[in-house]
């Protein structure tokens, strides 16, 4: 089935550790996105990629890093510099960059700092 | 900063009733989208309305857009228990093309 797969669904991180969230899509989409959602809040854009080997910072990129070496993959690393990383992380993709295109979301990953 | 603000924050209705929620935004937009999110899941796209459109329908959904008031509404008719979810509006501001701005959402509970 076509879609976006995020893993793991639940992740626990000790303070000072880096963790990487995986996002894979088989929709042949050029654009991919990472959003953060805090309880009772809307989504905030962390990073986005319009095409392979290219990515740009979103509104809250500090403490995060990404790579886009393959069209289907857009992993997000939450570094120790992110002071409050506990949140729900959503990966998304669209045919091309731009809001005229429907954005498809994965099922999300819960990250908790312990 | 959040561009879209939904109202009400929460809504509880019975099956068969209509549910209406509103979204207000601050700056000029290219379009506005509505998404649904079931608890702990990803978002699902419902409908997109462009800035030059005033109303769109999709099944039991009706969306209106009033650019002079910078507001939009989502109406779900004949609601079902399966409509229980959070609903978000997302705006595409003219000055930051492609960077959707999401509101905090309206949590809708439909009881049988």
Image (tube, coloured by chain):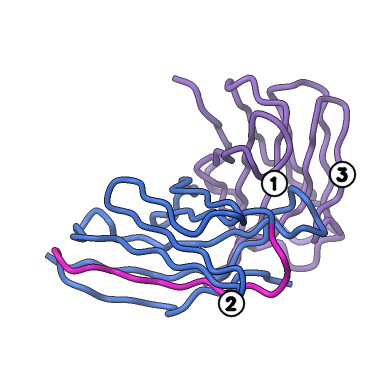
Chain colours: A purple, B blue
Q: Nearer the viewer, mark 1 or mark 2?
A: 2
The image position of residue A53, as x and y in percent, is 87, 26
Would residue A52 appear left or right of B93 to someone viewing this image? right
Q: CA–CA distance between discs 2 and 3? A: 32 Å
Mark 3 belongs to which subunit? A
Where does label 1 land, which residue? A34
Where does label 2 land, which residue? B69
Along the line of sight, the residue nearer the viewer: B111 or B93: B93
Mark 1 belongs to which subunit? A
Where does label 3 land, which residue? A56
Q: Residue at x 30, y 61 (%)?
A: B76
Quadrant in the picture for the C terminus of chain B: bottom left
Q: Residue at x 55, y 41 (%)?
A: A105
**Label 1's element?**
strand
Along the line of sight, the residue nearer the viewer: A60 or B68: B68
Q: Are marks 3 and 1 on the same chain?
A: yes
The image position of residue A85, as x and y in percent, is 71, 62
The image position of residue B89, as x and y in percent, is 53, 62
């Amino acid at each position: 089935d076509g879609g976006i797969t995020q893993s793991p669904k639940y992740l626990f991180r000790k303070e000072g550790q880096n963790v990487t969230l995986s996002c894979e899509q088989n929709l042949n989409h050029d654009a991919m996105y990472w959003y953060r959602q805090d309880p009772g809040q809307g989504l905030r854009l962390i990073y986005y990629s319009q095409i392979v080997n290219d990515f740009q910072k979103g509104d809250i990129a500090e403490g995060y890093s990404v790579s886009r070496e393959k069209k289907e993959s857009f992993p997000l690393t939450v570094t120790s510099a992110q002071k409050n990383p506990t949140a729900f992380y959503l990966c998304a993709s669209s045919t091309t960059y731009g809001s005229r295109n429907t954005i498809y979301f994965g099922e999300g990953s819960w990250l908790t700092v312990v | 900063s959040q561009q879209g603000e939904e109202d009400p924050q929460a809504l509880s209705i019975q099956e068969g009733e209509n549910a209406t929620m509103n979204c207000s935004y601050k700056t000029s937009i290219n379009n506005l989208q509505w998404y649904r999110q079931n608890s702990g899941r990803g978002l699902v796209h419902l409908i997109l309305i462009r800035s030059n459109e005033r109303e769109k329908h999709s099944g039991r959904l009706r969306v209106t857009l009033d650019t002079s008031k910078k507001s939009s509404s989502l109406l779900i008719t004949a609601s079902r228990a399966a409509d229980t979810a959070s609903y978000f509006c997302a705006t595409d501001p003219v000055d930051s093309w492609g960077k959707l701005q999401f509101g905090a959402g309206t949590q809708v509970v439909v009881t049988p």
